Image: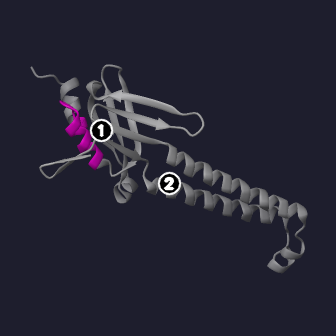
Amino acid sequence: MEAQAGKILVRHLNIRQSISVLLFKLISIELFAGFSIFVLHFLIFNESTVEETLKSWNAYTLLILITLVLCKTAFTIFIVVRWLEEYYEISDHSIMHRKGFVFKKEEEISFKHIRAVKLEQGLFGRILNFGTLVLHDWDMRRDFTLYQIHNPNRYKQILVDLIPDVDVDKRTLREHIIEPDE
């Protein structure tokens, strides 16, 4: 980074999926695991009290519960590692999407091909400040998405500043494609 006239020049930015989305996934795992143990309890045990349930526990029951806990732990670790290993890197000329822990994959899109930036954000996205940026590549006729990133309005503005002649919203895109000037 260099400082010039009170400004900080950044050569690239790393963007991850929103921490809110990660927390939602982890809470969902906890709820699913709790529900699974609750259902398993009623499938295995017909007793109605806790004391009767504890008296009827055996090695088979403990093995099932330990297996469930290990599966939940492994799935939690998988989700956290996947979140850590997937990110977008914005440089002054392109965006690189990097993902994978064992099998790494990189996808790069140059700014010279991007002509439209669109923000998709639902109700929870507005409340928790996350959303998806969709970049349209007119030359390749495909979309490149920055999926459920935190603070999407900030990164949308950064991309608009970096990409010359970009259409920002749907209405502008419609005017240029469907309704040309006469």
Which mark is nearer the camera, 2 or 1?
2
- Residue 60 sits above or below residue 80 on the image: below
- Alpha carbon separation for disc pair 2 and 1: 23 Å
Quadrant position of residue 133: top left
Is residue 165 magenta-colored? yes
- Residue 107 sits above or below residue 3 on the image: above
Instruction: Identify residue for label 2.
Output: 22
Residue type, label 1: Lys
Q: Is residue 112 left or right of residue 17?
A: left
Instruction: Identify residue for label 1.
Output: 118
Q: Please, what secondary structure does the residue beneath circle 1 have? A: strand
In the rendered structure, which disc, 2 or 1, sits on the residue that comes first in sequence?
2
Q: Which residues are magenta?
A: 154-170
Q: How is the image coloured?
A: one colour
Q: Measuring 78% from the left and 56% from the top, which residue is drawn there?
A: 67
Dots 2, 1 in contact, CB < 8 A = no
Quadrant position of residue 93: top left
Q: Please, what secondary structure does the residue beneath circle 2 have? A: helix
Image location (x, y in percent) of residue 75: 64, 51
Q: Measuring 89% from the left and 60% from the top, which residue is drawn there?
A: 60
